[in-house]
Amino acid sequence: MGVYLVTDRQLTADRDVLRPVRQALDAGVRSVQLREKDMPPRELFYLARRMRELTSEYGATLLINDRVDIAIAVGADGVHLGQKSMPPNEARTVVGPGMLIGVSAHGLTEALAAVGSGADFITLGPIFHTESKVEFGEPLGVEKLKTVCASVNAPVYAIGGIKREHISGVMLAGAAGIAVISAVMGRPDVRASAVELVEEVKARRLRRVSE
């Protein structure tokens, strides 16, 4: 997935989440998680349906945060679960074999448990300091990321305070890519910010393959 964009309409000037997502897709982002936790279910359903239409235009992957029912209803590619969500193995019985299941983890124990329960991939964080993840304690850092990447049999995406200058270290640690919120959604020029991240991840991936 390279760059995995997680939405947050609170970071946009007019709370129009579709506009910055389109700009990010124009920049080459091909994975989006619709994560609007405070949105009423009915409103979220209609937004998810529009997001499915938008991501389909670009051939991009769409995951819905937590709401397995909405993911199924709109034909999303997957669902992203938290530590307090439905367990991955139980979600699998509902969504079937063809849907991606991602899980947020905040350390090795949670990552191993998620993969053992059937998660297709992990987002691990916070790797660096970020205001959106302060409830999860101190940043894990690149060394703990490296340990998790080496220990789980699934792709790991680094999340939490990820900036362009962090990508080299994150990818060297074994991450499959990065998951970002404010690094794209909260920027004045969403497209330019997304282009920088997409190109840097792509370059680091190519370098890793050639080494």
Image (cartoon, rainbow, N blue to C red):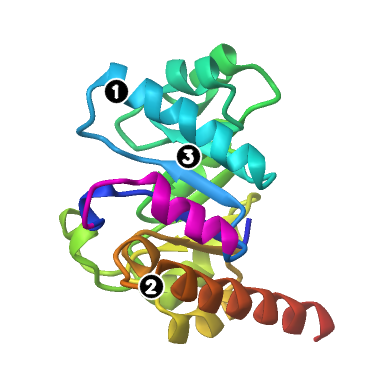
Q: Which residue is mark 1?
A: 43
Residue on which the image places disc 2: 189
Q: Earlier in the sequence, mark 2 or mark 1?
A: 1
Which of the two marks, 1 or 3, is nearer to us in this view? 1
Image quadrant in which the C terminus is located = bottom right
Q: Earlier in the sequence, mark 2 or mark 3?
A: 3
Instruction: Give the x, y percent position of residue 67.
Output: 39, 24
- Give the residue displayed 62% in from the left and 42% down from the top: 61
- Spatial CA span between label 2 and label 3: 38 Å
Q: Disc 3 residue type?
A: Ala
Label 3 CA crowd tier, 10 Å (few <14, some 14–19, many 20+): some
Residue carrying label 3: 113
Residue 15 falls within the magenta-colored stretch:
yes
Q: Amino acid at mark 1?
A: Glu
In the rendered image, residue 178, in percent from the top left (x then y), is placed at: 51, 64
Residue 39 in the image: above or below residue 123: above
Which of the two marks, 2 or 3, is nearer to us in this view? 2
Q: Residues within 10 Å of mark 1 (few under 14, many from 20)?
A: few
Q: Can residue 155 be seen in the rendering of this structure?
A: yes
Is disc 1 placed on a helix, strand or loop? Answer: helix
Of 38 and 177, the residue lying toward us: 38
Give me the residue at 54% from left, 17% from top: 72
Magenta region, main secondary structure: helix
In which quadrant is the N terminus drawn? bottom right
Residues shaded magenta: 13-26
User: Residues at badges 2 and 1 in contact (C-beta under 8 Å)?
Assistant: no
Answer above or below: position of 179 versus 168: above
Residue occupying image coordinates x 51% and y 15%: 73
